[in-house]
Image (cartoon, rainbow, N blue to C red):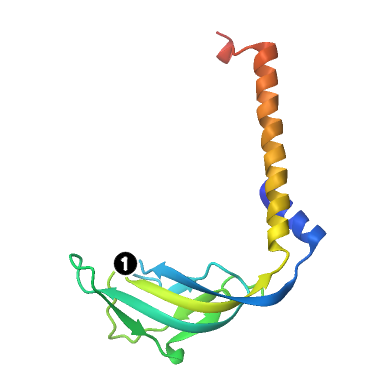
């Protein structure tokens, strides 16, 4: 698709600068089957903690927290690009999690310092392309009129 091609082209032109590290916390909802937590950032360096937030019942707002030990989760590369981006949680067989429980994962990842300028350039190109498409429509409408299906 054109947007993906444009992103890759901008990445190629500007390059990447993964020098600085940032911390982030993701909250992911447990759907009932999969205990793999796909994080919102790539190039994750390490996991600070994994918590499970459990609601006591549907009517109350009280939640309890379960802090998992380091042996209960593992950082994995889910897409095979060499960078870790997913936390695989290993729960004991006796653990019964309810649907809509929340996994809270705090992690440290490598941040692309050129990300901001690349986003500005990408959005500018998108804006220009949108302007060209809308301009083409307006020009066609004024020259040829709006004669839908020849009626």
The answer to whether 99 appears left or right of 18 in the picture is left
Number of marks drawn: 1
Which residue is painted at 42% across and 68% down in the image? 28
Instruction: Give coordinates of residue 99: x percent, y percent.
Output: 29, 68
Residue 120 image point, x, y percent: 70, 52
- Vertical order, 7 against 20 (above or below): above
State whether residue 118 appears in this view: yes
* View extreme (top): residue: 151
Disc 1: which residue: 100
Q: What residue is shown at x 54% (from left), y 67% (from top)?
A: 40
Q: Is residue 97 above or below residue 40?
A: below
Left or right, residue 7 beside residue 68: right
Q: Nearer the viewer, residue 139 or 116?
A: 116
Give left or right: position of 12 versus 87.
right
Residue 1 shows up from this direction: no
Q: Quadrant of the C terminus?
A: top right
Q: Residue 141 lies in what quarter of the image?
A: top right
x and y, in percent, of residue 70 in the image: 46, 90
At x 65%, y 29%, the residue is 134
Quadrant of res 31:
bottom left
Q: Position of residue 124 (x, y in %)?
A: 71, 45
Secondary element at image label 1: loop
Instruction: Tell me if mark 1 has few (under 14), some (14-19) or many (20+) residues whose alpha carbon lies within 10 angstroms of its own.
Output: some
User: Taking 71 as reference, is 128 above or below it?
Assistant: above
Toward which corner of the image does residue 64 lie, by quadrant? bottom left
The single residue placed furthest to the left in the displayed view is: 59
Q: Residue at x 31, y 67 (%)?
A: 100
- The outermost residue toward the right is 13
Judging depth in this view, the residue of 96 and 129 nearest the camera is 129
* Image-based side of 60 in relation to 4, left or right: left
């Amino acid at each position: 698709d054109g947007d993906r091609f444009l992103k890759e082209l901008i990445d190629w032109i500007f390059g990447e600068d993964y020098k600085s590290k940032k911390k982030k916390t993701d909250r992911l909802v447990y759907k009932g089957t999969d205990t793999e937590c796909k994080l919102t950032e790539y190039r994750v360096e390490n996991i600070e903690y994994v918590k499970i937030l459990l609601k006591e019942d549907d009517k109350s707002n009280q939640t309890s927290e379960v802090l998992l030990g380091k042996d209960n989760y593992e950082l994995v590369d889910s897409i095979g690009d060499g960078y870790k981006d997913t936390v695989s949680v290993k729960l004991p067989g006796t653990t019964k999690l309810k649907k809509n429980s929340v996994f809270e994962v705090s992690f440290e990842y490598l941040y692309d310092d050129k990300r901001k300028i690349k986003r500005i350039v990408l959005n500018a190109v998108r804006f220009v392309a949108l302007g060209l498409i809308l301009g083409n429509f307006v020009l066609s409408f004024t020259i040829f009129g709006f004669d839908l299906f020849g009626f």
